[in-house]
Amino acid sequence: MTYVVAEPCVDLLDKACIEECPVDCIYEGGRMMYIHPDECVDCGACEPVCPVEAIYYEDDVPDQWKDYTKANVDFFDELGSPGGASKVGKIDFDVPPATNLPPQLHDE
């Protein structure tokens, strides 16, 4: 099991989660953050710091965002497991369902 970033993150990219992650497993895509399922150690440090409550334990992802569990896996199909997001930097790429959404407006 792992943590999952869901729809509230799309077009927000707050990055507070990155600062809290002790294993550097949260990667920045073009429109949202993604947690690498094999690199995550399930510590949960990222979940409480997310300002829009976009991070959930895999079993607790709300039904309307279940597709994001697969998205957090699919994002790494070509990238593989680089062993740390800071080595890779921002990746201008996303996967459905994030790519299927119109631009999301967030209150400042």
Image (cartoon, grey):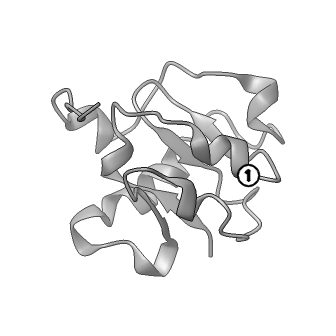
> Where is 34 relative to 46, above or below?
above
- In terms of depth relative to the viewer, which is nearer, 106 or 96? 106
In the image, is 36 to the left or to the right of 54?
A: right
> In the rendering, at what x and y percent does residue 33 appear?
51, 40
Q: Residue flagged by tag 1: what amino acid is it?
A: Cys
Q: Which residue is at a point 71% across and 40% down the rendered structure image?
A: 80
> Where is 18 relative to 41, above or below?
above
Other residues around mark 1 within 10 Å, as few (<14) / some (14–19) / many (≥20): some
Residue at the spot of label 1: 21
In the image, is 80 to the left or to the right of 76?
A: right
- In terms of depth relative to the viewer, which is nearer, 69 or 5? 5
Q: Which residue lies furthest to the left in this view?
A: 102
Q: Which residue is at a point 77% across and 44% down the rendered structure image?
A: 24
Q: Residue furthest front?
A: 108
> Where is 45 relative to 96, above or below?
below
Q: Is residue 77 visible?
A: no
> Where is 57 relative to 27, above or below?
below
Q: Is residue 87 visible?
A: yes
> In the rendering, at what x and y percent does residue 3 appear?
57, 65
Indicate the quadrant containing the C terminus: top left, top right, bottom left or bottom right.
Answer: top left
> In the rendering, at what x and y percent does residue 65 appear?
28, 62
Indicate the quadrant containing the N terminus: top left, top right, bottom left or bottom right.
Answer: bottom right
